[in-house]
Image (tube, rainbow, N blue to C red):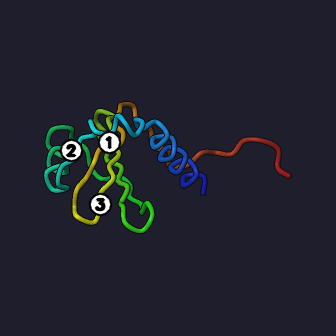
Amino acid sequence: MFKRVVTSALIFGAAALAPPANAQQHTKCLDRDTMVQILETRYNETLSSVGLQGSSQLLEIWRSEASGSFTVLITNPEGTSCIVASGQNWLTFESIEKVGIAS
């Protein structure tokens, strides 16, 4: 449960950091196959998580365990993928031990 909360927080946090609408003309969009090839070969990233955004867009998180880089994509039904966020030092939490007084 906590893992989902952390993942959701990271996704929504990344979405909040997306550039404003007037700056999105510089967003990098390519057909999904080309984008995947670049992420896999140039950045050594693999698909880590996916989720539906609305009924027509797929949100994808790609990451590299080796370098810590990550890329957040939105893919539309026509097969076009756009980078909405990217960065370094991605952390994955498998589980977090609860500390405190039992109630």
Does the CB distance between marks 3 and 2 fall below 8 Å? no
Please state which amino acid type lies under the numbered disc 3: Asn
Above or below residue 89? Residue 57 is below
Camera-near label (3 vs 2) is 3
Percent position of residue 24, x then y:
33, 39
Measure the alpha-carbon separation of dots 2 and 1.
8 Å
The residue tagged 3 is 76
Q: Which kind of residue does numbered mark 2 sit on? A: Leu
Horizontal and vertical percent position of residue 83 = 30, 44
The residue at 37%/66% (across/down) is 56
Residue at x 54% of width, y 55% of height: 4
- Marks 1 and 2: in contact by CB < 8 Å? yes
**For the image shown, how many numbered marks are present on the structure?**
3
Mark toward the start of the polypeptide (2 vs 1): 2
The local secondary structure at tag 1 comes to: strand
Residue 94 vs residue 79, the one in the foreground: 79
Q: Does residue 86 sit above or below 81 in this rendering?
A: above
> Which residue is painted at 28% across and 39% down in the image?
25
Q: Indicate left or right for 37 with 24 as reference.
A: left
**SS at circle 3:** loop
Instruction: Identify the mark nearer the N-term, 3 or 2.
Output: 2
Circle on res. 71: 1
Q: CA distance from mark 3 to mark 2?
A: 18 Å
**SS class, disc 2:** helix
Left or right: where 22 falls relative to 25: right
- Where residue 100 is drawn, which disc sits there? none
User: Mark 1 belongs to which amino acid?
Assistant: Thr
What residue sits right under mark 2 in the picture? 39
Q: Residues within 10 Å of mark 2 (few under 14, many from 20)?
A: some
